[in-house]
């Protein structure tokens, strides 16, 4: 889900909470929005440059995100568990932070699954394992093959999950059909997309 949608829905939830505790409302809104900072951190780590224009950064990131493995340091189950444990132990403002985190994850997870049959939020351990596959392929000079295989795996996942027309609609909205057009699209094993971890 987009940042402005998270901000709008977070505000709608925080507003009634503000009558009870303005600090908790602010904490919920801040946490539900700031989780998305990890997209930017991943972009900086991937490209090794700080974006000069937000628009260019978003465009670059969008191109990457459907084809390549990502390491999302906040969008993961471990973050939810860690924040949950801290909230349970302190029972203070972190309860509102946990509320913001859970709201964000739910809003990313549900629409993503309905549209793509793909769970966007997964484990950090799984993210790192998938990313290591990518870095190994790059070191072996097989980056393009890896990315084509990732694309085909996505296509295979969608083809198992929906009709061909629906899969084409989703894929063209993601821009995936335009990547490596010289390499024919083949439905690969979509298992890595269907995995919960
Ligand atoms: Zn998000």
Image (tube, rainbow, N blue to C red):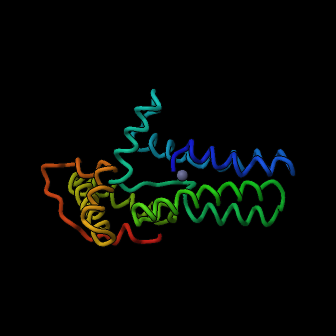
User: Where is 26 relative to 132, above or below?
Assistant: above
Q: Quadrant of residue 69?
A: bottom left
Q: Residue 79: where, in percent of width, then height?
A: 62, 60
Residue 6 left/right relative to 140: right
Please identify the residue farthest to the top as the structure is shown: 52
User: Where is 170 relative to 191, above or below?
Assistant: above
Q: Residue 172: where, in percent of width, then height?
A: 28, 51
Mark count: 0
Q: Residue 65: where, in percent of width, then height?
A: 39, 50
Please identify the residue farthest to the right as the structure is shown: 20
Give the residue drawn at x 57%, y 46%.
5
Give the residue drawn at x 63%, y 44%.
8
Give the residue drawn at x 47%, y 46%.
42
**Visible in this render: residue 147?**
yes
Residue 82 left/right relative to 109: right
Q: Nearer the viewer, residue 137 or 104?
A: 104
Q: Quadrant of residue 142?
A: bottom left
Residue 24 left/right relative to 159: right
Give the residue drawn at x 40%, y 32%.
56
Residue 97 left/right relative to 129: right
**Visible in this render: residue 124?**
no
Q: Residue 11: where, in percent of width, then height?
A: 69, 45
């Amino acid at each position: 889900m987009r940042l402005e949608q998270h901000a709008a829905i977070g505000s709608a939830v925080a507003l009634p909470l503000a009558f009870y505790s303005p600090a908790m409302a602010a904490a919920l809104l801040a946490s539900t929005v700031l989780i998305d900072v990890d997209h930017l951190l991943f972009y900086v780590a991937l490209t090794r440059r700080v974006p000069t224009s937000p628009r260019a950064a978003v465009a670059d990131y969008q191109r990457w995100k459907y084809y390549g493995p990502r390491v999302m340091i906040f969008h993961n189950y471990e973050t939810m568990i860690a924040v949950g444990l801290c909230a349970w132990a302190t029972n203070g403002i972190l309860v509102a932070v946990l509320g913001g985190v859970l709201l964000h994850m739910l809003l990313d997870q549900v629409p993503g699954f309905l549209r793509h049959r793909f769970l966007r939020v997964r484990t950090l351990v799984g993210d790192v394992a998938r990313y290591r596959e990518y870095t190994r392929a790059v070191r072996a000079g097989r980056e393009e093959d890896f990315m084509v295989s990732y694309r085909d795996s996505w296509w295979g996942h969608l083809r198992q999950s929906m009709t061909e027309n629906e899969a084409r609609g989703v894929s063209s909205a993601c821009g995936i059909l335009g990547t490596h057009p010289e390499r024919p699209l083949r439905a690969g094993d979509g298992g890595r997309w269907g995995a919960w971890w």
